[in-house]
Amino acid sequence: MLDELKDQLKEALIDLDEERFSKVLKELLSAGEEPWSIILGPMSEAMEEIGKLYEEGEYFIAEMLVAADIFKKALKEMKIEEMESDSSLGVVVIGTVKGDVHDIGKSLVSTMLRAAGFKVIDLGVDVDADKFIEAVKEYDADIVAMSALLTTTRNYMKVVIDRLKEENLRDRVKVLIGGLSTTKEFANEIGADGWGKNAIDGVEVAKKLVGFS
Ligand code: B12
């Protein structure tokens, strides 16, 4: 029954059928399904399919935008952004790198980090090296977390790491990266300290980086 509802939810998002999506989401929640399992399960799977449809020329930017909008509304409905904690694990400065405006994954990681006990400074999207450096200094960050979904923007992560070195900040902060265009190998290649596959994994890696697990 739950699996069936999850499939229906995924399909409704792929079809951009907001009304059906919202109805099935309510059913799933009242059946006791956890918001995070819905977000990282059928909702993320649907976004992947929508990306494929875009690649195949079936969908265009407009459809990707509508999907993002439905996704974000669902996060609001599930009150995902309102999770707070005591900020005792340290400070994370996070942003989607320059040239890249994809913000859903980055915002989910922010939310999860906050819920887990980090103070999170979210710089938004299209963030350049100057902005990252300023924030690291201002908030005395423990971790710089970067997101990139495009293969053309992921290389900018290395630019930020190089700037951290130039500013003599590299020894003071850990660098965590993630996003569709990145891999563990890529993280090693550019000299990041950690890579997270998704928001939950990202939190585990972040905790390790600051010595809390
Ligand atoms: C929605 C969407 C858009 C929306 C974004 C709206 C928004 N507010 O974010 C819009 C329409 C703006 C858009 C634009 C473009 N897009 Co787009 N988009 C997507 C789509 C369909 C979904 C992305 C998404 O939100 N996924 C859901 C979230 C939950 O997943 P996620 O972002 O991957 O995040 C998870 C993990 O990656 C990880 N994570 C993410 N960040 C971080 C950071 C850290 C530190 C950690 C630990 C983990 C982590 O955790 C998250 C939660 O699990 C993807 C398809 C896909 N497969 O993802 C294409 C996709 C990313 N887009 C693509 C493209 C090509 C574009 C455009 C270049 C199209 C164009 N010609 O203009 C532009 C680029 C704009 C720009 N300069 O950034 C391609 C990228 C291909 C590539 N290899 O580079 C994709 C893969 C589609 C495809 N298959 O072709 N897009």
Image (tube, rainbow, N blue to C red):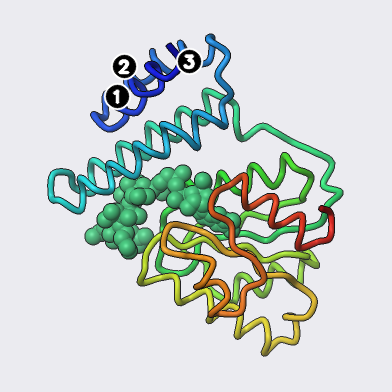
Task: Give the residue at mark 1.
Answer: 12
Q: Would you place residue 186 above or below residue 197 in this image?
A: below
Please tell me which residue is depicted at 68% across the width and 86% down the height of the picture: 165
Task: Give the residue at mark 3.
Answer: 28
**Residue nearer the viewer, 169 or 185:** 185
Does residue 53 appear to the left or right of 106 in the view shown?
A: left
Disc 3, SS = helix
Q: Label 1 near label 3: C-beta < 8 Å? A: no
> Which kind of residue does numbered mark 3 sit on?
Leu
> Which kind of residue does numbered mark 2 sit on?
Arg
> Which kind of residue does numbered mark 1 sit on?
Ala
Q: Label 1 near label 2: C-beta < 8 Å? A: yes
The answer to which quarter of the image holds residue 167 is bottom right
Disc 1, SS = helix
N-terminal of the two: label 3 or label 2? 2
Residue 15 % position (x, y)? 23, 29
Cα gap from disc 3 to disc 2, whole angstroms: 12 Å
Q: Would you place residue 14 above or below residue 203 in this image?
A: above
The quarter of the image holding the N terminus is top left
